[in-house]
Image (cartoon, rainbow, N blue to C red):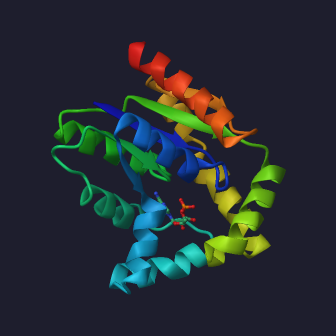
Amino acid sequence: MINIVIFGPPGAGKGTQAKILADKYHLVHLSTGDILRAEIAARTESGLRAKEIMDRGELVSDQIVIDMLASKLESDARGYIFDGFPRTIAQAEALDELMDTYNTSITLMLSLEVPEIELITRIFIRGKDSGRPDDRNEDVIRNRIVQYNRKTAPLIGYYSGQGKHYSITGTGGIEEINQRLCQAIESGIHA
Ligand code: AMP
């Protein structure tokens, strides 16, 4: 079983690449952002509470996202690609415990590196079609990057400490970036 964390700041291309990798390696793609947006669309209580936080570009509470993610794990999955999760050390620790209860573990963490100026441009372009309110306001986009640097980037140290962190250049074409990710996966699996 391979379990991948696809990592990087907002706009790094995690969702796009996660979909391609999920198809190629037959993994279940779990995006906490997508799960939260589905909760908002279904107008659930936790979704509506999360919406205000997401619209400000802040992080939803650890317990809410951990519980949401835990409810999506399946006992017969061939592996997962986690996209947008974990985003804090507490979430990474909870993920390790969850994987342990399924007698598995995170195989590797692929971190997409993209310069900040490009992230902002990419998110603005995506916002034209995505319909996401948090992709349309520059202050919110900047706050998402601030939150990433403050709370999420420390996970690089967490996974490096476990020997699972792979840094991937996240600029260039989708196909080219995908090849870099696949190379890292192949070397990570056989490491
Ligand atoms: P994303 O689709 O991954 O860009 O996530 C959009 C927004 O959903 C984020 O800015 C957060 O407000 C919220 N969110 C998604 N995943 C998480 C997470 N793992 N922890 C906390 N908040 C999250």
Q: Where, by quadrant of the figure, is residue 52 drawn?
A: bottom right
Seen from the viewer's position, the closer of residues 34 and 148 is: 34
Give the left or right position of residue 164, taking residue 153 as reference. Answer: left
Looking at the rendering, which quadrant does residue 102 occupy? Answer: top left
Camera sees residue 56:
no
Left or right relative to 58: residue 158 = left
What percent of the width, then of the height, locates residue 34? 45, 65
Looking at the image, residue 111 lies above or below residue 52: above
User: In the rendered view, would you say 190 is above or below 179?
Assistant: above
Q: Where does the image place residue 78, in percent across and percent down from the top left?
A: 25, 37
What residue is drawn where x is 72% and y is 66%? 141
* Residue that protrudes farthest toward the right in the picture: 117
- In the rendered image, which quarter contains the C terminus? top left
Asked whether the viewer can see residue 9, the reply is yes
- The number of discs equals 0
**Residue 111's spot in the image, x, y percent?**
59, 36
Instruction: Identify the residue at image location x=40%, y=74%.
Output: 38
In what quadrant of the picture does the N terminus appear?
A: top left
Q: Residue at x 66, y 48 (%)?
A: 12
Residue 14 placed where, x, y %? 57, 48
